[in-house]
Image (cartoon, rainbow, N blue to C red):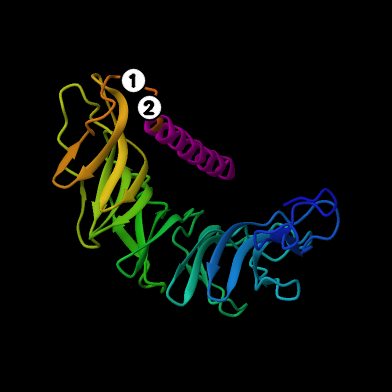
Amino acid sequence: ADNGTTGAELWRTDGTEAGTTRVADINVGVNGSNPYKFAAFGDYLYFQADDGTTGAELWRTDGTGLGTTRVKDINPGASGSYPQSLTALGDYLYFQADDGTTGAELWRTDGTELGTTLVKDINTSFDSYAYGFTVFGGFLYFRADNGTTGAELWRTDGTEAGTTSAADIHVGEDGSSPYNFIALGDFLYFAAYDGTDYRIHRTDGTTTERVPFPIDADQSAGCECAPLTALGGRLYSYVYSAATGSEFAYLDEPTYVLPETNLDGSMNSAWTVALSTLALITLAVGVGLRRRAGVAQR
């Protein structure tokens, strides 16, 4: 939050006015440290912040000013490593960071400076842009580009040797660009491009396959599969058909159906509006990432 004096800094609240206070003024002055990308891990809250000297780096707090410290200056200098996608698995917090040498790659930390290390340089010639971290079956799954197969599905057990490609869905240099990972039951679901269209896929950690949705004659062959949401053992999204437009849908394997409500072709149902809005946000974020990657490449 920005109080108009110190800039955007780290605050906390117990739900009362008196109990809403600034935790630390990390970047002293009016610019602020702009803390964000928060993730709870152990007894600390981890986040990205810029102290005005080292750039955006990995920080943590125990909720006190003295207990708010930088974990490590991953990219020495003023540029910062921009840690993001902070995700806890076991004894480590995993994230993407750029150390200024290997590019944006997969890192992990145990909360100490010495324990903050590069897991693997997946793309040795550029950036792998590892992100979308999701815990499933004791592994951390994510999207990464190794520079050869394009952006595909990867997973890690936290070791360099155990960081491997999980599936090459769209064979070639373009990749399937998987995104929107959701763990549900015995599978990890996600959207991926199969060379024809974006479709919902799943993996059990061994086999990766396209979810066999039956396609009606008037229904789009691809999927409008952002977002995917799991609730009560079902996978929710929305689909398009000429008869109903874009409508709320769910997966109850082995069937895939439209709900028996609001099937009048209206595009104004609360669910449709909400899911469509989230889909547009997801798309915008994806475009932003691709644009950033393109700029970096040039």
Q: In which quarter of the image is the C terminus?
A: top right
Q: Give the range drawn in magenta.
A: 271-298
Contact flag, marks 2 and 1 (Cβ < 8 Å) = yes
> Within the image, what quadrant is residue 185 found in?
bottom left
**Count of numbered marks:** 2
Q: What element carries label 2?
A: loop
Up/down of 236 relative to 126, above or below:
above
Between the residue at mark 2 and the residue at mark 1, the CA separation in whole angstroms equals: 7 Å
Sort mark 2 into few (<14), some (14-19) or many (20+) by Cα contacts within 10 Å: some
Residue in the picture at 41% in, 32% down:
276
Taking the image as shown, residue 6 lies to the left or right of residue 12, namely right
Do we see residue 256 in this rendering? yes
Q: Position of residue 57 (x, y in %)?
A: 66, 63
Q: What element carries label 1?
A: loop
The residue under label 2 is: 269
> Within the image, what quadrant is residue 162 found in?
bottom left
Q: Which amino acid does label 1 sit on?
A: Ser
Residue nearest the observer in this picture, 207 or 3? 3
Residue nearest the observer in this picture, 31 or 265? 265
Do we see residue 152 in this rendering? no
Residue in the picture at 19% in, 58% down:
207
Q: Where is residue 146 in the image (x, y as percent from the top left)?
A: 41, 55
